[in-house]
Amino acid sequence: MTEQRQDRRKFKRDSSLNLISLELLDYKGNVATIVMGRTLDLTVKGTKMEIDEPILFLSAIKFEIVLKENILKVKGKVVYLNKIEENKFHCGVHFQDLSPEIQALIEVFLIQDLSKKNQALIEDLLKSKGEGGFHEQN
């Protein structure tokens, strides 16, 4: 029998893909390099992103996330980096100093996006029920 693993995360993650522009900062806080990428998941506390260049663990970064019609400017710290393949890295970033306005925009985006996904799942279930996908048990 297979056991389901319980999700122990504090914050729900949304697996939406959003474009990012990431600025790596030098020790003085100046922009040293710009890297493009996309988010793989997003929470109110941070994001997992896919980028094409490695960055240093615990680096301070600034980046912009495109969420629908909003471009959010945020700061963060790199909390993990994993090489997936040649020129492809997954990077975890913990947000730092989020303004209440940006945090609210992220929360609204997450709620709306998850609601759309839940609605699509419900519609799929209803379609499969109409096609004999569900059977009553006696």
Image (cartoon, rainbow, N blue to C red):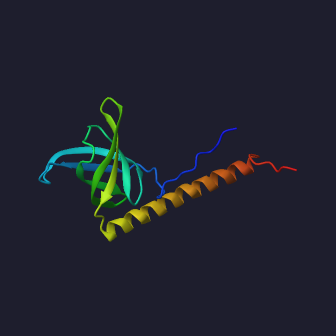
Q: Nearer the viewer, residue 8 or 70?
A: 8
Rendered view: 103 above or below 33: below
- Whether residue 137 sits left or right of residue 81 in the image: it is right
Q: Look at the image and tell me in which quarter the N terminus lies.
A: top right
Instruction: Give the residue drawn at x 74%, y 47%.
Output: 131
Q: Residue at x 58, y 58 (%)?
A: 119
Residue 96 appears at what percent x and percent y? Answer: 29, 60
Residue sitting at x 64%, y 51%:
124
Where residue 98 sits: x, y (%)? 30, 64
Residue farthest toward the right in the current orientation of the protein = 138
Q: Residue extending furthest bottom? A: 100
Figure label count: 0
Please provide percent x and percent y for residue 95: 32, 57
Horizontally, residue 138 falls left or right of residue 115, namely right
Quarter-of-image position of residue 102: bottom left
| Above or below: residue 78 compared with residue 105 | above
Q: What residue is drawn where x is 88% and y is 50%?
A: 138
Q: Is residue 44 above or below residue 88?
A: below
Residue 35, x across and y down, in percent: 24, 44
Front in this rendered view, residue 99 or 106: 99
